């Protein structure tokens, strides 16, 4: 019985290690750029007539913003607009949402984070929103 | 007790397996995005701290042993091209334009777009393999930037850039870039080709940063959520030599679409190399002859003429004219100044003169057979109201080799030598006491640039009107946005200046021919009416 328990524990440790490895996903800034521009920016422009450029914040400010997960001054969450559920809801009218419909939420969030970090005011390549 | 233990054990086992499967599934998803067979971060040669770009190249060449020698044979390296049509020695090393004019004595700035390191004067060692820059084309981080003034090098230490701006540039992490290399992309090619002429979209008009991640409306092929072509999808490269040339463009491609496995040395970057010469579908079953009519047009009309209705469509303005003769005016404070238009485009710069910027520009159209002749240093020019062509395009409706092509025509006024009657190559860039952008003295700047080329200069400076032709071939719109018939077949249409053809709908046609055509059409109609009426009459009589 002890042997069996050891195997189970070992598997659980292996599983969690592998999970941690998977967690260390390296964000794809190009995919993030597409989503940022074609979903985030296009909606911002349509609803507020104002785009938000990655250069409006520093890297630290973007990290804090995404960590806080408060969109529209806390009215809703950022993650909500990155979720598969949201993408499914707009994919009929938004090609980027359609193309990335099956990308796991966390991966897409990392992609966007990679893009805004790179394009931030103090980033490696400050970027515009269009 | 045993039963409880068994249930607990089963639950733990199940949890363990689920955790493992979940992790493996996530790992596989992460890996799914990467199609490369090599993870360069695992190569020991690249796991080191690099001091310079050439150090990275040295590491790359330990595996890619032939890459540098291949690059050495390309225009991207030599910046030289011998036109076999007319034996003109072209390439950036030799030609002039009516943007920043030439590279002479501006090497350290212009060569930020050279695929090499260290080209700071005319003594650059073109035989050095370590001076080849692999990263500028193969960077995938998007953080590798060669700065103007550093002779093709990126920043290796923290520095103020541009000098005096107060803006601090961080050094590039060479190891990180080297470990992430991959295929070329729109971003890597665009780092130079989007910024030709000294800034985003300035030179070409059909290439700017909006193509880095475009939507379908801007470019149907590069659409980042659609076909997602990279530059190399069309400019299919072999041995590092990228096909497609503005010195010897393929104006008419009579070949059929390329077939995989079939040897074909024709240019792979033409529309026809994929679409063939009869690209419009014909549906005779539905009595739809529209495709046939369009396919007839492909004999004389370049695809780009209808399918690129305008250029600079992505929100980035392109320079349409540049007047160097007005450079040198200072602001009220006696210092160099800039002026901007209502959209924020710079339209005057003390260092450069006046500009006209354009967005959504309708091209000009010309017969073009692919032959281009440049006005080179030493060629005689004369000042007049007619602009001197920097590159003279050849073509006619009757040579059997020409098509009607859309062009950006860049118009300029640039310095020339009124005594020797030649265009000149001024030293402009640089933080020295000779370059025009610092000292605002044409004579000194031109004398230095010409001396470097071993060309005579009288010491006198005047300005001459020039124009330069740029065939438009990128920013292909979706078919729904292609030109309709009346865009060309009407009075005052976009083809109104294209001569030598009879075009239905245009008022400058031969009136007799128009009248003969209309008379025939009218007679045909009358014939049909009379015939129909006759049959009805006869039918009634029999009845």
Image (tube, rainbow, N blue to C red):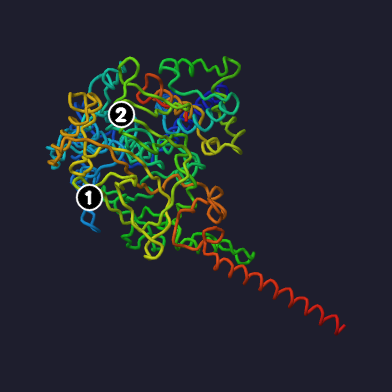
* Of the two numbered discs 2 and 1 in the rendering, the one whose residue sits closer to the viewer: 2
Q: Are marks 2 and 1 in contact (CB under 8 Å)?
A: no
Taking B403 as reference, is B339 above or below it? Answer: above
State the residue at coordinates (46%, 15%): A64
Task: Name the residue beneath numbered marker 1.
Answer: B81
Whether residue B64 can be seen here: no
Find residue A49 and report its horizontal and vertical position in percent. Answer: 57, 25
Foreground of the two, B145 or B184: B145
Foreground of the two, A8 or B122: B122
Badge 2 or badge 1: first in the primary sequence? 1
Task: Name the residue beneath numbered marker 2.
Answer: B327
Dot 2: few (<14), some (14–19), or many (≥20) neighbours within 10 Å? some
Mark 2 vs mark 1, CA separation in Å: 32 Å
- Residue A92 appears in which quarter of the rendering? top right
Dot 1: few (<14), some (14–19), or many (≥20) neighbours within 10 Å? some
Find the residue positioned furthest to the right.
B543
Check the picture and name the quadrant holding the C terminus of chain B: bottom right
């Amino acid at each position: 019985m002890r042997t069996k328990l050891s195997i189970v524990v070992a598997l659980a440790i292996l599983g969690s290690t592998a999970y941690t490895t998977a967690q260390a996903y390296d964000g794809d800034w190009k995919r993030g750029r597409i989503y940022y521009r074609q979903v985030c920016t296009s909606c911002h422009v349509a609803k507020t007539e104002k785009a938000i450029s990655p250069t409006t914040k520093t890297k630290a400010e973007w990290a804090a913003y995404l960590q806080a997960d408060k969109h529209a001054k806390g009215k809703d969450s950022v993650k909500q607009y990155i979720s598969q559920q949201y993408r499914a809801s707009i994919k009929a009218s938004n090609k980027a949402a359609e193309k990335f419909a099956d990308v796991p939420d966390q991966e897409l969030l990392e992609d966007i984070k990679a893009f805004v970090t790179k394009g931030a005011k103090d980033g490696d390549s400050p970027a515009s929103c269009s | 007790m045993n039963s409880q233990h068994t249930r607990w054990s089963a639950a733990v086992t199940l949890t363990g397996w689920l955790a493992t499967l979940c992790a493996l599934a996530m790992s596989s998803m992460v890996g799914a995005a990467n199609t490369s067979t090599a993870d360069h971060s695992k190569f020991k040669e690249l796991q080191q701290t690099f001091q310079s770009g050439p150090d990275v190249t040295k590491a790359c060449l330990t595996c890619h042993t032939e890459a540098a020698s291949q690059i050495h044979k390309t225009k991207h390296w030599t910046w030289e091209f011998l036109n076999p049509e007319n034996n003109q020695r072209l390439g950036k090393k030799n030609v002039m334009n009516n943007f920043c004019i030439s590279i002479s004595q501006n090497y350290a700035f212009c060569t930020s777009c050279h695929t090499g390191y260290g080209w700071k004067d005319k003594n650059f060692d073109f035989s050095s393999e370590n001076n080849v820059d692999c990263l500028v084309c193969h960077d995938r981080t998007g953080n590798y930037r060669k700065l103007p003034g550093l002779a093709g090098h990126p920043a290796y230490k923290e520095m103020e850039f541009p000098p005096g701006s107060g803006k601090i540039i961080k050094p590039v992490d060479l190891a990180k870039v080297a470990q992430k290399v991959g295929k070329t992309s729109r971003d890597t090619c665009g780092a130079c080709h989007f910024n030709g002429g000294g800034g985003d979209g300035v030179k070409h008009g059909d290439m700017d940063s909006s193509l880095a991640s475009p939507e379908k409306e801007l470019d149907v092929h590069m659409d980042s959520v659609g076909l997602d072509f990279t530059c190399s999808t069309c400019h299919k490269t072999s041995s590092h030599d990228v096909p497609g040339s503005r010195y010897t463009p393929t104006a008419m491609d009579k070949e059929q679409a390329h077939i995989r496995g079939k040897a074909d040395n024709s240019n792979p970057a033409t529309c026809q190399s994929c679409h063939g010469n009869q690209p419009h579908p014909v549906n005779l079953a539905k009595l739809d002859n529209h495709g046939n009519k369009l396919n007839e047009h492909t004999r004389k009309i370049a695809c780009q003429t209808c399918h690129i209705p305008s250029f600079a469509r992505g929100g980035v303005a392109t320079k349409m004219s540049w007047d160097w003769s007005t450079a040198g005016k200072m602001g009220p404070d006696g210092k160099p100044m800039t002026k901007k238009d209502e959209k924020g485009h710079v339209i005057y710069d003390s260092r450069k003169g006046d500009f006209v910027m354009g967005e959504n520009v309708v091209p000009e159209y010309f017969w073009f057979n692919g032959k281009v002749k440049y006005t080179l240093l030493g060629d005689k020019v004369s000042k007049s109201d007619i602009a001197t062509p920097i590159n003279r395009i050849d073509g006619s409706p009757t040579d059997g080799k020409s098509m009607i092509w859309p062009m950006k025509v860049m118009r300029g006024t640039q310095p020339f030598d009124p005594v020797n009657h030649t265009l000149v190559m001024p030293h402009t860039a640089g933080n020295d006491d000779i370059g025009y952008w610092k000292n605002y003295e044409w004579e000194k700047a031109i004398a230095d640039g010409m001396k470097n080329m071993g060309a005579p200069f009288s010491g006198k400076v005047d300005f001459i009107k020039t124009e330069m032709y740029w065939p438009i071939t990128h920013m292909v719109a979706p078919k729904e946005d292609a030109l309709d018939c009346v865009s060309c077949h009407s009075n005052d249409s976009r083809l109104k200046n294209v001569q030598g053809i009879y075009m239905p709908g245009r008022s400058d046609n031969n009136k007799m021919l128009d009248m003969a055509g209309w008379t025939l059409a009218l007679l045909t109609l009358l014939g049909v009416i009379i015939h129909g009426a006759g049959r009805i009459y006869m039918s009634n009589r029999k009845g």
